[in-house]
Image (cartoon, helix red, strand yellow):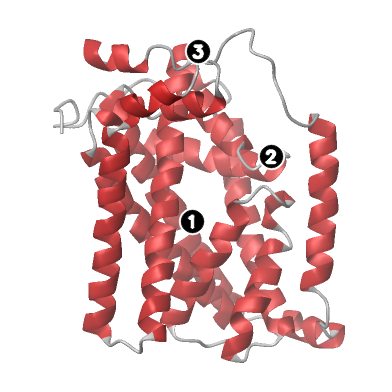
Amino acid sequence: MRPDETELFRGSASEPNAPRRGLPTWLSLVLRLAATIALMAWALRGVEWHKLVDLVSRIDWRWWTAGLAIGVLVQVIAGIRWAALARPIGFPYSAGLFVWRFFEGSFFSLCLPTSIGGDVVKAYRLADSTHGRLLAGCTVLADRLTGLAALGVLAGGTIIARELALGLAGTVAVGAGLLLAAIAVFWLVVGSLDRLLRFFPEPHRARQFISQLLPYQLRPNLMTRAIGWSLIVQMGGAVSVALIARAIGVKLPLSIWFAVVPLVALAMVLPISIGGVGVREGGLAMLLAPSGIPSEQAVAIGLLWFLCTIICGLIGGGLFLLDRNPQHAAPAGPMPGDQVAV
C-alpha cells in the first residue's frame, strides 16, 4: 500500500472503547427465526399441498442440475470480481484463493444468524492482522455495493423495457443508460468520501462505514470493473433460476427472470429472515403471479433455488475444512498491471 493510501485509511477503525448498541445476539436470532416462520407461512398461504407434492414428485433433475451448475459458476465469477477489487489495494493472492474464500463465506452465511456473517468470515480469512482484516472488510463491502448496483441496473432496465414494450435495441439502450448512471454515481460518491467524513464525529457509525471505502478514492476504476463483473454475476443468477424453473415445467421468457430474480435478491439482502427463507418464496409467488404462475409452482421454484444455495454453501464448508488455517495460503504475487494507479 502506498503512503497516501495509508493516510487515507488511517483512523477507519472503530473506537476501542466505543459503546456497542443493538439487540443481544440471542434476541436478534429469536426475532429472525420468528420472522422466517411468519414469512414462510405467508408464502404458503393458499398453496394446495397435494399440487405442491405432485410438483416435487415430477421434478426433472437434469434441468435442476444445469441450474445448480450455473449457480456454482456464478459463485466462481463472484470470487473473481472480489479479487479484482482486492488485489490492487494490498491482497496479491491468486484468483483461486478469492474464489475459495468466497465459497467459505457462502457456507457461513448459511450457518451464522446474521446476513453479514459470511462477509465477516471472508474478511477474517483473507488477512492475518487487525488492520489487514479491516482493509479486507473494505473490499468485501465494495464487492457488496457493486453487486447491489448491478441488481438495480438489471432489474430496472428489464422492467422499463417490458413496461414500454421496447425491442432489443431499446432494451440495450435503457440498460446501458442505467449502467452509465450507476457508474457515474459511484465515481461521484467515491471521489467525495474524504469530504463526507468531515460531517460525522469520530465514533459515529456512518464515519466508520464511509472510512472503509477510502482506499477506492484513489482507484475509482476498480469499482467500474467490478460493476461489469457484477452484471455477469446477476445475469447468471437469473439464468440459473430460469433453469431451475424448467425442472418443474415452468417456461417463461428470460426477460421475466431478469426482472424477478434481482428484485427477489434485493429483498433477501434485508436482514429479515434466516437464509432468505420466506422472502424468496413469497417474493417469487407475488412477482410471478402476473405471468400466470400459481403459488405452488412459485414456492417449489423458491425451495429448489434454496437447495442450490445450500449445496453451494456445503461446497464452501468442505473447502473450509480443507484449509482451516488461512495463513497456509501464500501470496501469488500481483497480476500484471495490478499495482498501476487507475
Look at the picture and state if 62 lies above or below 32.
Answer: below
Q: Which residue is mark 2?
A: 114
The answer to which of marks 1 and 2 sits earlier in the sequence is 1
The kind of residue on which mark 3 rests is Thr
Q: Which residue is mark 3?
A: 130
Q: Residue at x 38, y 77 (%)?
A: 160
The answer to which of marks 3 and 1 sits earlier in the sequence is 1
Q: Is residue 199 left or right of residue 25?
A: left
Query: In the rendering, at what x and y percent does residue 319 appear?
Result: 55, 37
Q: Looking at the image, do the residues carrying marks 3 and 1 touch, with CB atoms under 8 Å apart?
A: no
Quadrant position of residue 247: bottom right
Which of the two marks, 3 or 1, is nearer to us in this view? 3
Q: Nearer the viewer, residue 245 or 61?
A: 245
CA separation in Å, label 3 and label 1 = 31 Å
CA separation in Å, label 2 and label 3 = 21 Å
Query: In the rendering, at what x and y percent does residue 179 appear?
Result: 28, 60
Q: Secondary structure at mark 3?
A: helix
Give the numbered dot on residue 150. none
Q: Which residue is mark 1?
A: 72
Look at the picture and state if 168 lies above or below 268.
Answer: below
The kind of residue on which mark 1 rests is Val
Q: Is residue 147 left or right of residue 223?
A: right
Is residue 257 visible to the viewer in this orientation of the structure?
yes
Q: Nearer the viewer, residue 69 or 255?
A: 255
Q: Residue at x 55, y 36 (%)?
A: 119
Q: Secondary structure at mark 2?
A: loop
Q: Residues within 10 Å of mark 3 (few under 14, many from 20)?
A: few
The kind of residue on which mark 2 rests is Thr
